[in-house]
Each structure stands twice: as C-alpha cells, then as structure tokens.
Amino acid sequence: MKPLKCSLRFKTNLAILITFFSIALLFSAIHQPMRNRHFRTMTEKIELVLDTLVQRDQAPLGNEIFDGNIRAMAIRIKAMMEVKGMLAISVFDATGALLIQESRNPAIYDLTRLKGDPGIRQKRWGNTDTLTYLRAISVIGEPLGWIRICYSLEDIKKNQRYTNRIVAGLLASILIVMLAVLNLILSRTILRPITILRDAMEQVGRLRYQKRVHIESRDEVGDLAASFNRMSRDLDRFHREIQTRQEETNQVRLFLKNIIDAMPSVLVGINRDQGITHWNLQAEKITGFSPDRARGMAVHKIFAWKGFPAAIIEKSLREKKIRQQTKIPVTINGTPRFMDMTVYPLESTGKTDAVIRMDDVTDHVRMEEMVIQSEKMLSVGELAAGMAHEINNPLAGVLQNAAVIKNRLTGDLPANHKAATACRTTLPTIRSYMEHRQIFSLLDHVHHAGTRAADIVTDMLSFSRKGEGSFSFHQLNRLLDETLNLVSSDYNLTKHFDFKQILIQREYEASLPQIPCDKGKLQQVFLNILQNGAHAMAENPEKTSPDRFILRAKACPGTLQVEIEDNGPGISPDQCKRIFEPFFTTKPVGTGTGLGLSVSYFIITKTHNGSMEVASVPGKGTNFIIRLPIQQEEL
C-alpha cells in the first residue's frame, strides 16, 4: 500500500498542535492542584462563615430548642436562609428527631434525617454541588440538638468555570495566533521557497535545464536555491555537451551507415547464436528483407541459397579465426551466381560476434572465363592462321601444276609436239583421248576447287588476323557474303549438319553506302549468329520446310540495318530477355559457352555505338536485328 502523502505545512501544524496540547496538558497538570487549593480555601471560608453564623445564633437557638419554640426557630432559620448560597437548614433535637426544616427545594435537599458526624463535607444534590454542614448546639456544655446546613457551591463552580473558559480561550487564542504567525513565517521562509524549488525540479525533470529560481533569503533555503541554480547550470552545460556529442555520434553513425550501405558488398553482423544484428542496404537488395525484418533472424534462414556455406560461419565463431571461401556457386532466385564470403570474428565485452562479408563475383568469374575463352579462341585463330599458311603453299602448287598439265596437253607448243612424236603418237590423238576420257573436265574441276579453297583460306586468314581496333569503311552486304563463305565450310558428321545444304535468301537494298566499322569484329558477330541459327535449325525435330536464312540489309535514317532471320525452332520470351547475358546458353552442357552473343552484343553496342535486338516466335524462327550508325562520332 502506498503511504499517505503529507505536506510540510500539515506536518508543521501537526507538530505545533502536539506541542500546544502537550503544553496545555502540562498547564492543566499544574493548574489543577492550584484550583483544588483555591477550592479548599473557599470551602474553609464558607465553613468559617457558617461557623460564625451558627456561633452567633447558637445560644438563642439552643433556648428555643429547649423551650420547643418551633415558631421562633422557624423565624430564625428563615433569617439564616436569607444568606446567599443557603439551600436548606434543618434543626434536630438531641435524640436526632427533626424539629424544623427550611429548604428551597425539599424534593432535592432532603435533610430530615440526621446522618453523619459533625463537620463539613462536599456533596452533590441533584445538579448542584453543595457543602453539608453539621454541628451540635449546646448551651453551657449541655448538648440540646443539632443543626444541618446545606450550602451551594455553584458560585464557586461558576467562578472556576469562568476562569477555565478564560484560560481555555487564552490558550486557544495563543494557539491560533501561534499557528497563524508560524504558518505565515513558514510559508514565506520555507514553504514558498520549497514549492518554487519543487516546481523548478519538476521542470528540470522534464529536461528544461534552463530553469532558475530567485530566492533572496540568506539562510539554508537560500543556500539550497543557490545550489540548485548551480546544479541546473551544470546540468544545462552537460546536457548541451551530451547533445553535441550525441549529434556528432549520430552523424558518425549515419556516416558509417552510409558508407556500409554504399558498399557493393553484403555486410551482415551476427551474434554468437548466428542471429542477425546488423544489415546493410546491399543485403536488403539481394534478399528482399528489410533491416527491421531481418534483425534477430538466423542467418541461414535468410540466406537459404543452394550451396550457401553455413559451415564456415560456425567454424569461424568456434575457432575465433577469419575464414574465407571464394567463388562459391550458389543459386539465387533460380539464377546461378558466384559469391566470395569472408567471416570476421569480433571480440567485444566478452561476447563473440562476427561480421560476414559477401561479394557477388559472378561478373568477375565470367570475365575470367571469357578471357580464358578469348585466349583459347586466339590460340585457335593463330593455329588456324598457321594451318592456312601451311595449306596455302601446297594448294598453290596443286593449282600451278594443274595449269601446267592442261597447258602441256592442250597448248600448241613445239615441246608438246616433240614429246608426242617421241612417244610414237600425235598431239591431236592425245587430245582426243583426253576429251574422250573427260580429263580436261576433271582438270577444270581441280582448278575450280583449288581456287575456291584458296579463297576460303584467304578469308580465314583475314578473319583470324589480329586487328588494331581501327575503323575503316566497308559495305555490310559484302561483309555478310564473306562471312557466308567462311561459315559454308561448317560441317558436323555427328549431327549430320552441312551448312551448304541451307538455303540462303539475300534481300540487299541496292546502293548501300559504306560505313565505318571494324571488319573483323563485325564478321565475328555475323559468324556467331549464322552458326547459332544453323545449329538450331539442324537440331529442330519438328521442321516442316527446308532450313533457310534470310539476309537483309537496308538503309534507315542515320543507320544501316542488318537482319539475319532463320526458320528454326525459335526462342521463348524468357530466353529472349536473357539471350545477351554472359554465359547464358540454350545448348546442352558442354556444347556451348554462352559467350558468343554476349560478346557480339558488346561489339555492336559498345564498340560500334549501335543496337542489337532479337525477335522470335517459338516454332517459327528467330530474327536478329542490328543497327549501325552511318557515321561514327570518333574514327
């Protein structure tokens, strides 16, 4: 139970009342004996008066008793009743028989019977305090009778009550004046200053540290007010310093939070139980969990990725050592990614916490693979160039020897006739035999095939030759035809695929202008698209018409547009959205790298400031649309 609250004024007044009543009791204890002594003094005076009265009338009253003169006694007693305070007088004979009684109220003051010993005693009759006086009446030493007088003490009591009322009134007046004066002094010197201090302290309790009190008294209360003012000034100064430091702390905290949120890495703070304590913006972007939602959750429940290495977190916390794992293959929302993860254990206040840093290195890994693939392609290109050079020499010999053979068989030269005569035949006979056996036709086929092979080798050397990245002017239709010559040799016995069997439909606009471009890189783009389309058409099990490419080239405002369309199986809309992503491929594992179209997209958009799009209808085919500016900003 909450104790009852009492004000200082109440306590002070209560103390004054207790003190006053203590003084009153002490005064009463002192006054009561004095009052009793005064009462006895007054009683003795009354007894003296009564003694004097009886002594004066004793002799006559004794004679009247002796004579039995009741009438005289009655007159005498009535005279005695005239004395103020007399209530009743009775006269008895020597035997105690009542001779006469005079009473102001016989029903109350009954003195008909003689009782008690002579003397005076206090007795209460009805509501009146009285003195009963009994004395023997004797004459010359001979007892003749008795007289009993009842005398009222009411006047004495009234005087005492009056005196008591005066004393009580005086004490009450003293109490009231004391209470008023002390309350006034208490209010002005203690209560009001304390109330002001209390209100000021309440203001300070509400963080209003500028509050001051103005108390001019030169006593302990004034010292208390001065101490309060010093305290409030110190609190105000400390509060301002704390606010300044808090603002600085908040700015530093915000600055650090902005730094952490600006980092591309995922930063997660965890406790010993692997519950999340800190969460940066990159973590929210990757997982979709806000910091408030993630805080307190177990880290493995949020990063529930396939391949997430939760074991190294537990190991790092247990061993209190930094643990790192790189190029971790994980699956996020169905997309394969690569992550580097480092766990940094922290020792603070006896608790083991840790910071987890995760970096998405997918692009880096893919770039490494792209570099490796580019190195492989470069090596293959250099190997192809070397092979082309090696093939070119015997091929030139074949063509040259075939021309010499035909010249020696058909030429009308003296050496030819001389050789025929030496063989006992004639040159016409030899020609007739050759024509009959179609030798000349076979020689023409050898020459044609050799010439075509030489053209292919020349195109291969031109394609595989390292360029310097410089632009020169070329016609796109001629680049397309040269690329067709290269890809026409593509043949796969396993898949029964032969590019020569594909129908080529050319729709070139006449008089196309030359545009600045990197010839080798554009041919690489065309080659990737043609090879991908040819392989897709060859693997289409639901084909209803022969495989076909439609090559279009036309001029548009400010650009030249090239379209390469096939009638293969087509690409789904979801695959169209990702077709230019690095390492994305629709081919089975091990048959494609997923780099061809991403590199092609980079060549068109970044190197040539153009655009590259794909339009496809599943089951009907795919169309790649390339737009290249007629004029480049920088040549």
Image (cartoon, rainbow, N blue to C red):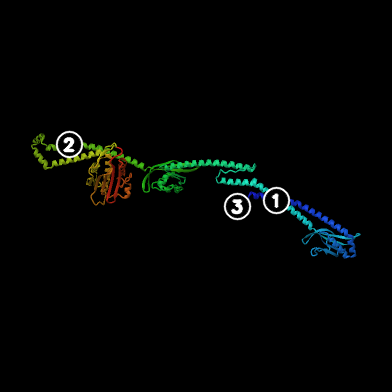
Q: Amino acid at mark 2?
A: Gln
Q: Which quadrant of the view contains residue 483?
A: top left
Task: Using residue 192 as the reference point, say whether residue 529 is left or right of it.
Answer: left
In front: mark 3 or mark 1?
Answer: 1
- Tags 3 and 2 touching, CB below 8 Å: no
- Tags 1 and 2 touching, CB below 8 Å: no
Q: Is residue 370 visible?
A: yes
Find numbered disc 3 in the image and state the secondary structure of the residue it sits on: loop
**Within 10 Å of the Cα at label 1, are there few (<14), some (14-19), or many (20+) other Cα atoms?**
some
Q: Could you say which is closer to the camera, residue 609 or residue 518? A: 609
Task: Using residue 202 as the reference point, say whether residue 356 is left or right of it.
Answer: left
Q: Position of residue 335 (x, y in %)?
A: 36, 47
The mark that comes first in sequence, 3 or 2, is 3
Task: Using residue 234 as the reference point, say whether residue 384 is left or right of it.
Answer: left
Find numbered disc 1 in the image and state the secondary structure of the residue it sits on: helix
Q: Position of residue 129 (x, y in %)?
A: 78, 59
Tell me the residue that label 1 is attached to. 175
Q: Position of residue 114 (x, y in %)?
A: 84, 63
The mark that comes first in sequence, 3 or 1, is 3
Q: Which mark is residue 400?
A: 2
- The residue drawn where x is 34% and y is 42% is 366
Tell me the residue that label 3 is attached to. 2
Q: Position of residue 540 (x, y in %)?
A: 26, 50
Label 1 to label 2: alpha-carbon separation: 150 Å
Label 3 to label 1: alpha-carbon separation: 33 Å
Q: Amino acid at mark 1?
A: Leu
Q: Is residue 143 visible?
A: no
